[in-house]
Image: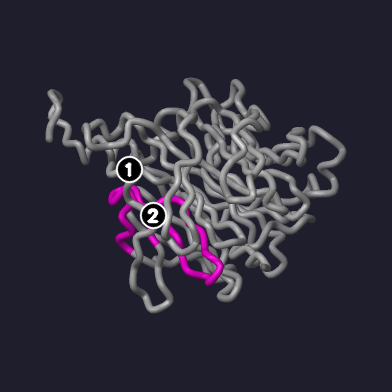
Amino acid sequence: MHDQRGLTRRGMLAGAAGGLALTFGPRVGWTQAAKRIEQLDPALDKIIDKAEPIKELATGYGGDLGPAEGPLWGKEGGYLLFNDIHTSRRLKYTPGSGVAVDLQPTNRANGLTRDLQGRLVSCEHDTRRVTRRELDGSLTVIANSFSGKRLNRPNDVVVKSDGAIYFTDPGAGLVPEQWDLQYSGVYRVTGDLGSLSLLTDTYIQPNGLAFSPDEKLFYVNDSRRRHIRMFEMLPNGMLAKQTDRVFADLGGSEPGVPDGMKVDTAGNVYCGGAGGLWILDPAGKKLGRIVHGQASTTNIAFGGDDWKTLYFTTRSTLFSVQLKVAGIPVPVAAKRA
């Protein structure tokens, strides 16, 4: 279907694939900042050394249709996977060896994680679904619709220790047909894939999501509102909606919005925002910022043998920096009965 300007519906989706970076790109007159670790609170010293180098590992990704995204460390193989949405490629970065193509095409996949069995879970833009790559190489569709309507554009995904899969689905308004969902949602799929539940539809642009180390708290950021919200969890895996509150506002005059998000084993939260990658304590206090000199931080992953390497992507580039605190491993340890 074409609109009056001659754009196909698929073309409109493609133009929005990098969505947030297009909507929230660099402000006029913005110039790159020098790379540095900026301290706002003495507690940052326990997390990262201010003199730690911010390493550029690979660059040249992204474009108007979508950025580098979805970094994910594979400890068994000692490599990092990440997506280049624009070229529909999944890339593999191996320390000391550089980057190689791991899969193409990917249906312009975005967020990646692994489930309790180590299977790769992916959010696909083109197919508007969340999928799982089985150990035998076959593909299982985890979710592609809700209440008989197709999902919008699944973005990011995380797996809880009970095997349940949580994902964000922004993009309401980008897919305007009457058979599409008219809201952006956050969803939960049971570990056996038997039940899909809408957790909340109160976000404009739900994006990155993460659990606290004890999984009692659930963080979801809203890129359009430029903040992170936090919920307490109910025993059944749903959200205690009355506990919904803003955990941190990461807006400001500099470019950059909350996108991918991760939590370390001490409960500190890492998320992109205005001017760089922010580090916050478990109470939401801003401890510091990794200023990487680019307009946006698209996603984050912990890696390395000790999970103390912080990998992160911008629209075009893969970076790393060393931490003093380990991140929560992926896959997360299975919950004991």
Range shown magenta: 104-131
| Mark 1 residue type | Ser
* Foreground residue among 96 and 283: 283
Vertical placement of 211 versus 191: above or below?
A: above
Vertical placement of 264 versus 332: above or below?
A: above
* Foreground residue among 168 and 84: 168
Q: Could you tell me if residue 25 is visible in this image?
A: no
How far apart are labels 2 and 1 at the CA level? 16 Å
* Horizontal and vertical percent position of residue 283: 77, 36
Near mark 1 (Cα within 10 A), the count class, few <14, some 14-19 or many ≥20, is few
| Mark 2 residue type | Val
- For discs 2 and 1, the disc positioned in front in the rendered view: 1
Residue 101 found in image quarter: bottom left
Q: Residue at x 63, y 53 (%)?
A: 55
* Horizontal and vertical percent position of residue 45: 85, 45
Near mark 2 (Cα within 10 A), the count class, few <14, some 14-19 or many ≥20, is many
Figure quadrant of the N terminus: top left
* Horizontal and vertical percent position of residue 111: 46, 52
Mark with earlier residue (2, 1): 2
Residue 175 found in image quarter: top left
Residue at which label 2 appears = 130
Left or right of 97 on screen, residue 128: left
* Foreground residue among 232 and 8: 232
Which of the numbered marks, if any, corresponds to residue 195? none
Residue at which label 1 appears = 147
Q: Residue at x 60, y 47 (%)?
A: 210
Vertical placement of 125 versus 224: above or below?
A: below
* Horizontal and vertical percent position of residue 203: 49, 30
Task: Verify whether residue 111 appears in magenta.
Answer: yes
Residue 173 found in image quarter: top left
Left or right of 193 on screen, residue 44: right
* Residue lying furthest right: 42
